[in-house]
Image: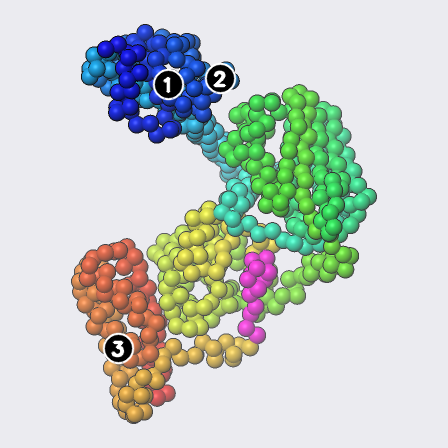
Amino acid sequence: MKLQQYVKKGSFYEAVVEDGSDIIFIVDYDGKIRYHNSSVRETLGYNSKSLIGKNFFDYILPETLSALKSKFKQSQKRAYTEKVEFQFLCKDRSYRFLEFNAINLKHKEKLNGFILDCRDITQRKMDAVELVRLQKAKEQFLANISHEIRTPINGIAGMASLLEQNPTADERETYLSAIRHSAENLKVIINDLLDLSAIESGKLRLEKIPFNLKDILPSLISTFTYQAREKKIALEYHIDERLNKILLGDPVRLNQILINLISNAVKFTHHGSIRIDCTVDRQQKDTCWVRIEVKDTGVGIPDEKLNTIFESFSQADASVTRRYGGSGLGLTIVKQLVELQRGRITVRSEEHIGSTFIVLIPYSIGKTRSLAKSVQAASKSLADVNAQNLRVLLVEDNDINRLYAKSILKNWQCFTDTAENGLVAIEKIKSDSFDVVLMDVQMPVMDGYEATQAIRLMDSPLNSIPIIALTANATKADVEKCMAAGMNDYLPKPFTPEDLHRKLFEDLKITPVKDANERKRTNRKSAFDFSYLRSVSGNNEEFIKEMIQTFAQNIPIVVEDMRTSIQHKNWENLSRLAHQIKPSFILMGLERMKSTLIFIEENGKEKTNLDELVMVATNFIATCEGFIPQLKEELASV
């Protein structure tokens, strides 16, 4: 039987699944197409039967033809060949990546031909190329960031070393100035990374407060005047008179957008001018679309790079960061900040001619009195907040970081106590009262997560004290871990006094307890509920006193046994001890600790979740040791 008869007979339908998505070709050993299904229309653009009689090899990308013919020849010796990639010419003259599995008809039907089951892998190939590109861009970015971070650190270390060599007054001022400059550069890079992290984690909050562009832009432009004058380039701006109105939005984030765009323009312009134009693009009812154009006569951006300049880990030229410095994240942050405000950003550029960045952001239109209220609120100073009575526990193991934060709090006349790790912090919270805890996350002995979880297991009101994480890790996962541990909020390092003030008094609205006696009375609130004991004993004071005394004597012994069990990894004994004391805690009205004891009992018995078991059991022990002194006070009052 000849191959053409085989096709007409339709026998091959039994061997091939016609699922409507794969392209099916039947070709002879010379490449002549004897059959193809209708999927060639959807994928390749050819009409039904239009390729029959044509030669398969005539549609293969020429530079790959030799390799594919070699594969065909090898396939003639096999019954089945898998995953042969090739590029096929489409009706629109483009090439698509396909992959075929070949059934050799010689083996079963004694025919010199193949059934080719072809799949479109164009998207897969594009994804692979894009993945490689992004990986290379990310590696380049990390190399650049590493270099940019090391440079100011080396500068700071070098200048600090020179300061130790008894410099003159002038030299000392020069060295200090260099240190400040290097520290500012380092802060810009780190803030870029933190901003991007906050945006991508969805934690960036936008304000909606009144502002006037005429109040913002002139002072912002003035910060670049010296740089522009030094490079001998003109720096001009114009604000449309129609924008002399109150807008409602986030002026800080608008400032950030403008600073990044103008900073880039100054950085990449070596002669000519920079011009910033602010106009009303359109106005609809109570919404004004503000159009801001930042135009320069700088180096420009190549056409092929215009689509990637807003991407993370991507620069128009890998040498740009090495030559000009910075994190290379400025435009990524700008684009995301614009889009968070329901706006859009576009760019026009010509290499060696210049670039124009166009930002469109919709703002609600406010009224004059709302701006007056905003100014009044903004002028509220630290003196307006009763920080003098604020009691802060600063938990930080790094001496320099501890000194920095304590100095800020001292300037605000707060009462500040310090702890070098979480375990010390827990003891201080038991013995004193605080309005807020600033908790470093990574510490020896007991870290911030464990300490927070232990505090949340304490008796009321100690377990409700606000805790703010101080962390150099501000990724989405790190922030979520802080919240899961029981922290109220987080403050990324490095932070400014303004950042700390905003977090304490604006975001969390921390207020000190004015009356010291009230503080003491609050702390003395009983964590125990003896109502069950009173009920079962008919309010028999002797019985109640005896039960409390027994509990107060036995629990420290059991707790010590639990600590020993943890040290020796005797999980079964730890489970037995938790089971043993569970009824006593219910009798004492400590019902909330029942779930903790059940967790210890069950996981100790099954020897599961051991890391978490150790942490929970350790926190439970710390909590017990904290309430035993209070229980003895209760015993005296019964």
Mark 2 → mark 1, Cα distance in angstroms: 15 Å
Mark 3 or mark 1, whichever is nearer to me: 1
- Give the labeled residue for mark 1: 36
Label 1 residue SS: strand
Number of callouts: 3
The x and y percentages for residue 333 are 57, 40
Mark 3 → mark 2, Cα distance in angstroms: 82 Å
Tell me, yes or no, whether the two marked residues, 2 and 1, touch with CB atoms within 8 Å: no
Q: Mark 2: few, some, or many residues within 10 Å (few <14, many ≥20)? A: some
Which residue corresponds to the image point at 23% horizontal and 11% vertical from the top-left?
A: 1
Q: Is residue 293 left or right of residue 88?
A: right
User: Quick check: 81 above or below 157?
Assistant: above
- Give the labeled residue for mark 2: 91
Which label is found at residue 584?
A: 3
> Considering depth in this image, is 472 or 226 the residue closer to the camera?
472
Identify which amino acid the numbered label 2 is placed on. Lys
Q: Mark 3: few, some, or many residues within 10 Å (few <14, many ≥20)? A: some
What's the magenta region?
501-514
Q: Is residue 502 magenta?
A: yes
